[in-house]
Image: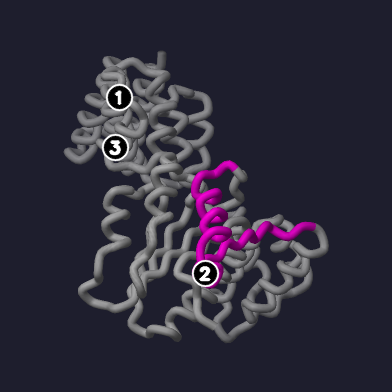
Amino acid sequence: MSEPQFRMMTGDAYLCDRALAEREAQLQAMDPGIERHGLFADELDISSLDVELRACSLFALGRHFVIRKIERNRKGKALAAVLDKPLPEGTFLTLLAGPLKATNAVLKMAKTKLKSGDPDNVMVSVLPTPKGTALQQAARSVLAASGLTLPNTLARTLLMECGDDLMALNSELGKLRSLAGDHPIPEAAARELCFNHTAATVYPFYDQLGSGNLAKALSELEGLREDAGRIVGGIVRHFTRLVMVRLLLDQRRPQSEIASMMGMQDWLCKRLIGQAKRRSFAPLAHALRLGVKLDQRIKQGRIAPDDALMQLILASAGSAI
């Protein structure tokens, strides 16, 4: 069976990934030398994509473009217009998205394309997360496909903690499979490896400090096992971004332009803008200058990292409006 050139899959991340794997196997069987291009919709330059989709490859006859996270693209109509154009022979396009509203521009384009175009060359698949008994059956299938044999107590705990997220379940089983090798899995070790037992990361601390929330920042800091000197360096990098964002906000730059100028993803830009809006430029710049100075003094051995960290935290949180 030949694969359609255009295919869109929306819904459950795990089910979409399985469908993508089957599609890629079919394309590989048709053309072992097919060239794969993996892209994310929230990072796309739409004009460049338009050219790239219709260009010829120098290294392969067939090309497969996989674009994930369609729901995160903020220029839906412009993206839909580019994706709606005919594809050259040998070029295949796969779009992946989470659950989408019927009003989504790319989904509407795909459904219109399906109705009005060649039905053998277009496919739209909606793969919602199973519910109830169907979800339990799907989870058991994921467990069976992993090739692992788990104690019943551990299997039940794993299924409960992953909830209805089949992708999370598959990821956890992958970690357990790496741990097991050809040997039985120690239950205590498997429980420690489970995702909800992983060590806290430093990023929530940076976000709370960036928002000027001293109490929450200290609460996040309490559970960290990072070196104090490394945390100081991280604060300097975080506040460097906040100063840049605050400066651009003062120039009335829109979010899309700020993200483009700073070379960051939309979700990260939105988060930093939320923090920078709680600040004024001068106190932010003062905290950044202090951070650079303290970082230098740590490296010169002139101040203990723990002392520098607390001094910088108090100064950084105090710069909130």
Residue range (magenta): 103-131
User: Horizontally, is 154 left or right of 26 in the view?
Assistant: right
* Mark 1 lies on residue: 253
Q: Percent from the top left, x then y, of residue 53?
A: 32, 61
Separation of marks 2 and 3 at Cα, in angstroms: 37 Å
Front one among 86 and 12 = 86
Quarter the C terminus occupies: top left
Badge 3: few (under 14), some or many (20 or more) residues near its Cα, within 10 Å?
some
- Image: 306 above or below 165: above
Among numbered discs 1 and 2, the one appearing first in the sequence: 2
Query: What is the crowding at mark 1: few (fewer than 14 residues within 10 Å), some, or many (at least 20)?
Result: few
Q: Position of residue 186 (x, y in %)?
A: 64, 74
Residue highlighted by disc 2: 20
| Mark found first going from the N terminus, 1 or 3 | 3
Q: Residues within 10 Å of mark 2 (few under 14, many from 20)?
A: some
Confirm whether residue 194 shows in the render: no
- Residue 259 against residue 213 in the figure, above or below: below
Going by the numbered disc 1, the residue's amino acid type is Arg
Q: Could you say whether the residue bearing mark 2 is in a helix, strand or loop?
A: helix
State the image coordinates of residue 74 (x, y, percent, origin top left): 43, 40
User: For this view, does 3 lie left or right of residue 210?
Assistant: right
Image disc number at residue 237: 3
If the image is split into quadrants, where does the N terminus sit?
bottom right
Number of marks drawn? 3
The secondary element bearing badge 1 is classed as loop
For badge 3, the amino acid type reads: Arg
Q: Residue at x 57, y 76 (%)?
A: 177
- Residues at marks 1 and 3, CA–CA distance in whole angstroms: 22 Å
- On screen, residue 172 versus residue 296, left or right, reads right
